[in-house]
Amino acid sequence: MKRRVLALVLVLWVGVGLIACGGYSAKLPPSGLADRVLASQEVSATRSFGGLVVINGFNDTLAAVHELSAGNSPGLMAISPTRNIVVAFDSNSNSVYAVSTTTEANLGTVQLSGPTYSMVVPTAEANGYAAVPSARVDGFSFVGAVVAMNLSTGATLNIAVPSAETVVANTTGAQLLVFSNGSDSMTVLNPTFASPPVDTSCLANTPNLVCTIVPGFSRPVYAIINGTNAYVFNCGFQCGGTQQASIMVVNLGTLAITNTIPVNGATYGMIVGSNLYVAGLGTPTGPLCASIPSAAPTAATYCGTLDIIDLNTLLDPYYNNPSMEIAITDGTHDEMDMSSNGQLFVGSYDCTNIGSVNNPNGEVRGCLAIYNTNNNTVVFPPDNGDVNGLQSFSTRYVEYVAQGGNLRVYDTVHDILLINDFVPQGSINITGYVGDVKAIDFF
């Protein structure tokens, strides 16, 4: 009996020792961190290279590991649904760098023929898609394509879509929705049937196995796929169209438009539960802030709007209803994220900046608005600059905001910068311009 007890004690001791010494570290990545966040960092006056900075999301500190290579000027990032692959676009070389979050090492690099502002990695496989509005291929006259990328080998397949600006994928990557500047149509691609290295199926004799062009929109710019439906964002007047901004419901099986919901403005949004949140201007400038009764006093002339559509009824009580309209910052809205406690962060670029965060005197305002879904109030944080990335966490009341080149950490209980011993200024100290932020673990 004593020997059995002694053996059990030894087993337990060894087990504890292995845990304490990292004996089970195979379950963790090389950095040893379980709550990782990546921030894309461009070159600066004091640095000759950029990269993807690894952050410990447990306490908002820089990890003691090397940055991941992603060219000199990485900015826009995209991540797979399982968070096993991250891609970053380097604007200096027009290259897409792919990183395995499991090994924390580069998977490969894909060379594009021009810049992209929209990328997707639909599945856990090393395949992605980038919309390249200026894409050109020798021997062809088209300008614009969706580029199918093999993220391991660097091989590409250019599917010609003139002026392709934004690409949205379904959960399998077998159906892509593509939106082009100045167009009133949506292009639907089935990349499985596309012929490498260049496919021109969209340029003639549509519909076909690869390409279907769906008309009837008003400057569509974005879509959210939810089950068998896509909610297509019609930018309308704001983008030079001839119709009011709206959300059109499209059946992805038949590609029929089944419903049209007018909204105040529509360039970006997200679905949370049964609500579809929609941000936009509605016109090239947006409404006068003074015309919205709920708008906070501001030196900004124009505001954006936030609409909330009930997906059960497909009704928007905020449309053309000044008494209920929700004022947010102006600019082109392309960022939105919900914190775990109901704070909706809405970001834009090219907005009206008021005051200076570096020399505050009176109102300071930039491209970020925070809508509290619990009490219907809006906070305009005293910061300046474009919002380039947002990241919330399911286990923390914290939001990371890439704004004006900085990575801010917000306390979402009070909608102010988090100030503590780890982030005494409310920012994670990253040298260089922060262009985007993504959590690569679920926490």
Image (cartoon, rainbow, N blue to C red):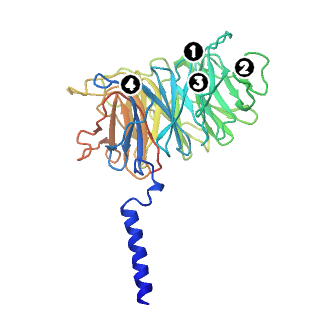
Q: Single out the mark in the foreground, 2 or 4.
A: 2
Q: Single out the mark in the foreground, 3 or 4.
A: 3
Q: Quadrant of residue 346?
A: top left
Element type at mark 4: helix
Q: Which residue is mark 4?
A: 289
What amino acid is labelled 1 in the image?
Ser
Whichever of callouts 4 and 1 sits on the residue coming sooner in the sequence is: 1
Whichever of callouts 3 and 4 sits on the residue coming sooner in the sequence is: 3
Residue 202 tag number: 2
269 or 208: nearer the viewer: 208
Label 3 Cα crowd, 10 Å radius (few <14 / some 14-19 / many 20+): many
Q: Which residue is mark 1?
A: 134
Element type at mark 2: helix
Label 1 Cα crowd, 10 Å radius (few <14 / some 14-19 / many 20+): some
Q: Which residue is mark 3?
A: 131
Name above or below for residue 61 compared with residue 121.
below
User: Quick check: can you spot residue 328?
Assistant: no
Position of residue 23 measured from the top left corner of the image (x, y, whole percent): 42, 61
